[in-house]
Amino acid sequence: MIVVFDSSVIIDDLRTLRHRERIQSLIGVIRTSSVVLAELWRGAAKPSDREFLRALARSHPILTPTEKNWLESGEILARMRADHGFAPAKLRDLHFDVLIALTVRSHGARLITTDRTDFELINRYCEVKLEVW
C-alpha cells in the first residue's frame, strides 16, 4: 500500500513530534505529493526547514497531479461552490487539498492527514482512502 502524508501531518510532527511513533511503525511504501512539497516550501522560513524539504524530496518518490487531476479539481470545486456557497478564498484554500486527494486516488494510495474537516468534505466529492490522525 502506498501512503502519502498531507502537509498537516508533516508540519504537526516537525513542531511536536506527535506522530513520530506512528510514522515509524507505518506499514506501506511512503510517497510524497508534489503539491504537499509546494505547500511546505511556501512556509519554509529557516535553512533547516529547506534542508528537511530537500531530504524529503530525495527520500521518497514524488507523485504529481496529472492534467486529468487538474481538470477534475476545477469541476469538484465548482460543485462545492454550488453546493455550499463557498467564497473564492475558501475554494483557493481547498484547491491544493483537492489536487492531493485526486493524485493519491489515481495511484490507489492512502492519504493520511490531520485536517479532518476539509478532507472529509473533499472525500464526499472524490472518494479516496483517507486516514485521519
Image (spheres, rainbow, N blue to C red):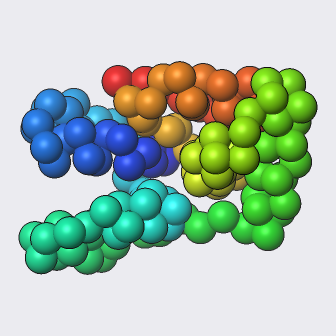
When asked about the image quadrant of residue 113, the answer is top left
Q: Residue at x 72, y 39 (%)?
A: 87
- 107 above or below 44? above
Position of residue 108 relative to residue 49, above or below, is above
Image vertical order of residue 11 relative to residue 67, above or below: above
Q: Give whichever of 83, 64 is nearer the camera.
A: 83
Write the residue at 20% across / 69% down: 45
Task: Examine the rendering and report whether any part of residue 105 can be seen.
Answer: no
Task: Choose between 111 and 42: the one closer to the eye.
Answer: 42
> Could you say where residue 107 lies in the image, as x and y percent from the top left?
64, 52
Task: Please provide percent x and percent y for residue 49.
Answer: 17, 67
Q: Residue 53 location, x and y as percent?
A: 26, 69
Q: Is residue 39 depicted above or below 122 in this figure?
A: below
Q: Residue at x 13, y 43 (%)?
A: 15
Residue 78 image point, x, y percent: 86, 43
Indicate the quadrant where residue 63 lies.
bottom right
Would residue 131 be visible to someone looking at this image?
Answer: yes
